[in-house]
Image: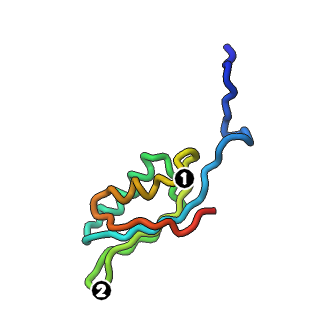
Amino acid sequence: MTTMFPVATAADPRAPRASETTIEVDLIGRDPHALARILVTLQRRRCVVTHVDFRLADRHRPGSLTVTLLEPPRHGRTVEAWLVNLVDVAAVRRLHAA
């Protein structure tokens, strides 16, 4: 059976590629489960996390999370919108994209 439409495969150079992005997330409160919620959301959205730096809030500073990830192609810049709607997330900033 042949397809009528060209299909791009992972080995196909025309296939869209994931772009590496670093996101900084400011957290509200001291819930250690916020880290798990963020990482699970990224996994469910087919992001590949390559590096994480997590700091739980203490009496001197709010919690923060810096995540480097490979964004799936065709998602545009939607990672920020996914994360800012999570419980305990105050703000999301894109630091840089490769």
Q: Amino acid at mark 1?
A: Glu
Q: Secondary structure at mark 1?
A: strand
Q: Quadrant of the C terminus?
A: bottom right
Mark 2–mark 1 contact, CB under 8 Å? no
For the point 36% across and 59% down, the residue is 84
The image shows residue 57, relative to residue 45, as above or below, that is below
Q: CA distance from mark 2 to mark 1?
A: 33 Å
Q: Residues within 10 Å of mark 2 (few under 14, many from 20)?
A: few
* Image colouring: rainbow
Q: Is residue 7 visible?
A: yes
Quarter location, residue 61: bottom left
Label 1 CA crowd tier, 10 Å (few <14, some 14–19, many 20+):
many
Q: Residue at x 51, y 54 (%)?
A: 77
Mark earlier in primary sequence (2, 1): 2
What residue sits 69% from the left and 16% below the top? 2
* Residue linked to disc 2: 60
Q: Is residue 82 left or right of residue 47?
A: left
Residue that label 1 marks = 71
Q: Identify residue type, mark 2.
A: His
